[in-house]
Amino acid sequence: MSVAKVVEVICEGPTIEEAINTGISEVAKTIKHIKHVDIEHIHAHVKDNKVNTFRVIIKVSFAVES
C-alpha cells in the first residue's frame, strides 16, 4: 500500500509556468519523491494596467517512504 502527503505552497513569478517551477524547485530542496502538482489558484498582480507578476497556489503531492 502506498501513502502520499500533500503540502500547499504559494509561489510567484513573471509567468505562471515560472511561478510553478520555482515552487516545485523550492519544495524539492526538502521533499523527495514529488509525484503531482495541482494548481489551486492563479492570481495576477497588475501594475500600470498590465500584469506584472503571477502568484500561484499549488498543492504538491509526494510519496511517503515506509
Image (spheres, rainbow, N blue to C red):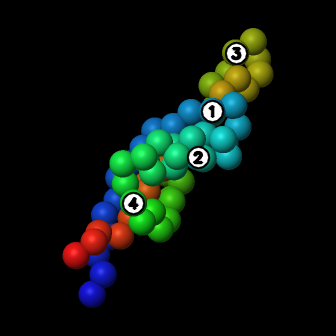
Disc 1 residue crowd, few under 14, some 14–19, many 20+, Cα 10 Å? some
Q: Is residue 10 visible?
A: yes
Toward the viewer: 32 or 56? 32
The amino acid type found where label 1 is placed reads Gly
Q: Amino acid at mark 4?
A: Lys
Asked if marks 1 and 2 touch (Cβ < 8 Å), the reply is yes
**Numbered disc in front, either 4 or 3:** 4
- Pick out the residue farthest to the bottom: 1
Secondary structure of the residue carrying tag 3 is: strand
Whichever of callouts 4 and 2 sits on the residue coming sooner in the sequence is: 2
Q: Residue visible at 53% across and 54% down? A: 39
Question: Mark 3 packing: few (<14 Cα in 10 Å), some, or many (20+)?
Answer: few
What x and y, as percent, mark residue 42? Answer: 58, 42
Numbered disc 4: secondary structure: loop
**Looking at the image, which residue is at 43% across and 57% down?**
60
Image: 3 above or below 60: below
Q: Which mark is residue 13?
A: 1
- Counting residues from the start of the chain, the first of labels 3 and 1 encountered is 1
What is the C-alpha distance between the residues marked 4 and 1? 23 Å
Where does the image place residue 53, in percent across and percent down from the top left?
A: 66, 27
Provide the residue designation for mark 4.
32
Q: CA distance from mark 3 to mark 1?
A: 14 Å
Element at label 2: helix
Calculate the distance from the C-alpha at mark 2 to the C-alpha at mark 3: 21 Å
Question: Does 58 appear above or below 61?
Answer: above
Q: Relative to 62, say whether 59 is above or below.
A: above
The dot on residue 47 is 3
